[in-house]
Structures are given as C-alpha cells and as structure tokens.
Amino acid sequence: MAKKEIPALIPELPEVNFSDYAGVRYLHLGSPWVQGSMLIDEPFEIELEYVQRMMAGLLFMNPADVAKKHAMQLGLGSAALTKFCYKKLRMKTTAIEINPQVIAACRGWFKLPRDDLRLAVINADAATEITQPCHLQSVDLLHVDVYDDEAAGPVLDSEAFYQSCYDLLAEDGVMTVNLFGRDSSYEQSLEYIAQAFGPQGVWAFRPTKEGNTVVLAQREPTRPERAELLLKAGEIESRWGLPAKKWLRLFKPLA
C-alpha cells in the first residue's frame, strides 16, 4: 500500500479585534496586548512613542527627497507606519502582513487606504516575500515590527533574516527594528543585526518606559556630525511633526 502523505499543518492565525479608550483605538490579536494604535480624530498621525522612533531613518535622508523614496513595513500592526509614510511623507509604500484579518481590520477600523499606484499591502509571509527579486535593493526606509499575538518576542529574528533585510535596501537605505519582547534577547538580536549590517552601521535608542528598544541599521554606515543631525531633526519636526530633536538625546551609534 502506498504511504499516505500527511499535509503540513498551517498555524492558526489569531483573532483580530480592537478597543477604544480616551480617544485612542487599539488593535489586539486575540489577547489584551496592544499591537498598534490610532488617534481616532487624527488617524494619520503616529500615536505610540516607539512607533514614532521607528521613523528615525529620516535623520539619514534629505527631507526634500523623501517623497521620491520607497518605504516598506514588515508587519502591518494598526498600519500607523504605513499610513504615515503614504499620507504624510507621500512615499511609495509597501506593507507585508501574514494575517489577512489584520489587513481587513486596518481597512475597516484604522483608516488604511485602498491600494493604488503608491500603496501596496501584500498578504504574505514576510520572511519569504522579501527574498523575491522584485524587492531587492528597492527599499529606502524599512520598518520591521513582527510579533506574535502575545507580543512575547520578534517572530523573525536571525542573522539570515536580517541579511535578507540588508539585501532589500538601496545603497543609502535604513532599517529600523522594534526589539521589545518579554522573552526576547536584546543582545542576541543586536548581534544578528551587527553580523548582517556590520557593527559600524548600527544605532540604538534607549528603551521606552514600556520596554520597546528601537534599533536602526544603515546599509552604508555614516557618522553625521551632531550639527547636521540637529538641522535634519528640526526639518523633520517642522515638516512632519515628529519629535526628532528629542530622539537625538536618546539615540547613538553602538560601535
């Protein structure tokens, strides 16, 4: 008798829901843990402090050229970064999200616009999707925030994964990663990133009070003078309302 093949098990994706409190809408994946948020009256602003810090790659870009660049998010969350890059920065924007319910929730509850010539939301496993040749060396601003429903640690966190992220970036491209996680190893994640990008290209914020530690990695390391960074931070604040001058007090190269 021929041996029957056992089909591979597809992991069950968590239920998606939301809650509203004090003018803020929160995204949940079947648990009380917050996976993203939105100011109900200002849906295209970024509400959470750590998510604002995920935009620190702007410090390494010419503000006048930002609208000509390409941003990509791995993990949609409540679409805060995707909406900000698309609506506020006017960038070409691509988001990759494995859970179709999250995409539907963002469109129904979090004001995520429909796809058009500048916006593409792809329902796929980011680890596989980012290796597709069409994406390689095409991304200027990469955001990595990929967590499970318990927010216990990054789902994608290995040297091979960060090497794939490196390969996505254009020559002067920048990646930011949220390394918050109750069970995650910050030092191990940092080592993986340094192995893929080189230690000279890695910068990090101090943790937020909630424990989120945002790490930035440049494909081509630079060391701008503080005066240059202050000038960029001032432009970022005046153009887009992000607290970029505050970032400079909390942000430094690691090497």
Image (spheres, rainbow, N blue to C red):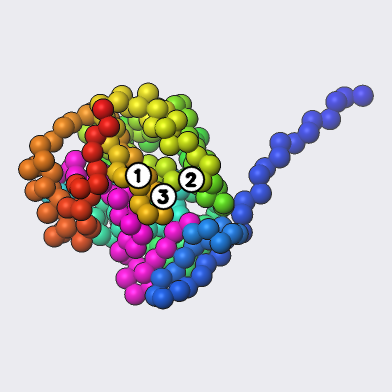
**Residues rendered magenta in the picture:** 35-62
Measuring 49% from the left and 59% from the top, which residue is drawn there? 34
Q: Secondary structure at mark 1?
A: strand
* Residue 239 percent across, percent down from the top left: 15, 59
Question: Height in image: 5 above or below 183?
Answer: above
* Residue 148 percent across, percent down from the top left: 55, 48
**Label number found at residue 143:** none
* Residue 236 percent across, percent down from the top left: 17, 54
Q: Are circles 1 and 3 on residues that touch, CB within 8 Å?
A: no
Residue 107 visible to an observer of this rendering: no
Q: Secondary structure at mark 3?
A: loop
- In the displayed orientation, state which residue is furthest to the right: 1
Q: Amino acid under label 2?
A: Gly
Q: Is residue 41 magenta?
A: yes
* Residue 156 percent across, percent down from the top left: 49, 37
Q: Amino acid under label 3?
A: Gly
Question: Height in image: 96 above or below 77?
Answer: above
Residue hosting label 2: 181
Name which of mark 1 and mark 2 comes first in the sequence.
2
Front residue of 182/2: it is 182
Instruction: Point out the image quarter for the C terminus.
Output: top left
Measuring 56% from the left and 61% from the top, which residue is drawn there? 32
Q: Amino acid under label 1?
A: Val
Residue hosting label 3: 211
Residue hosting label 1: 214
Name which of mark 3 and mark 2 comes first in the sequence.
2
